[in-house]
Amino acid sequence: MLTATHGPEFISFAKPQVVVKLWRKGDGVAKGVFDTSTATASVKFQEKLDERGNHEMLFAQHVLLCEGKGDCWALRSGLSKLDPSLDLDARSVSLIDTGSAQNLSDYANIAKSLRIPWCAITDEDKPLGGRVNPVTEKARKKVEAMRSQDDISAIWAGDLEACLGVPAPQKATPKWQAENTDTKPLDQMQQDHPDLFAMKRLSF
């Protein structure tokens, strides 16, 4: 049995382990429990791709779930512009790249098991005049089905590329953002890319 004192480096979603998260609640102690043997194949595969294994979320107080690296980069950059003194680690907020919209519900389920409030961010994925991509819609419904009053589902208007004005067929990769938007001050970002800040406000 593992507790937060062991640290994320001892966790593996591919091995049978039980993670118990304890915290003070009033005069008592509350807990959440996650059995790694119940982790889905997508979570185990993402562990192999992610250098940090996304294990840090098991020890966080809040979790931000993103579709990919570009979304994580944009969110971290945007939050740092809104508050230059913001330190996600110091606030025990874990920013997680789930690999795809379809994997969001898997990570939301892990957070739910450990009673960690989460915010899942997806592309609206709706072409002008068209309907929402059915794959994205299905993934979003799965996330929404497990959302509690402490959790948030947020949406980039259109998609991240549209919010940042990335010319097709390019993608909003961390490299593109570093070269094109990271250097802009907050007032210019809000003027040039208002949809980036138009999501439901995140508060912790």
Image (cartoon, rainbow, N blue to C red):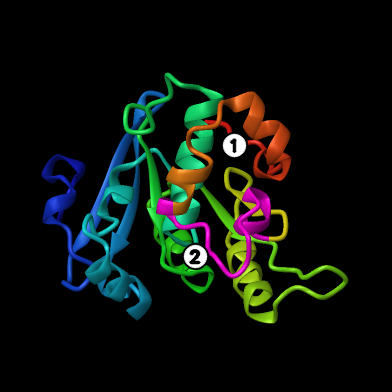
In the figure, residue 28 lies in which quadrant?
Answer: top left
In x, y percent, where is residue 36?
Answer: 26, 67
Q: Are marks 2 and 1 in contact (CB under 8 Å)?
A: no
Task: Give amino acid for label 1.
Answer: Leu
Q: CA separation, marks 2 and 1? A: 17 Å
Q: Is residue 5 above or below residue 100?
A: above
Evaluate whether residue 192 shows in this view: yes
Q: Residue at x 34, y 71 (%)?
A: 43
Evaluate whether residue 65 shows in this view: no
Q: Is residue 176 above or below residue 87?
A: below
Q: Residue at x 55, y 54 (%)?
A: 120
In x, y percent, where is residue 56?
Answer: 27, 48
Mark 1: few/some/many CA within 10 Å (<14, 14-19, 20+): few
Q: Which quadrant of the rendered structure holds the N terminus? A: bottom left
Q: Which residues are magenta?
A: 159-175
Q: Residue at x 68, y 73 (%)?
A: 137
Of 79 and 148, which appears nearest the observer? Answer: 79
Q: Secondary structure at mark 2?
A: helix
- For marks 2 and 1 on the same chain, the one whose residue lies earlier in the sequence: 2
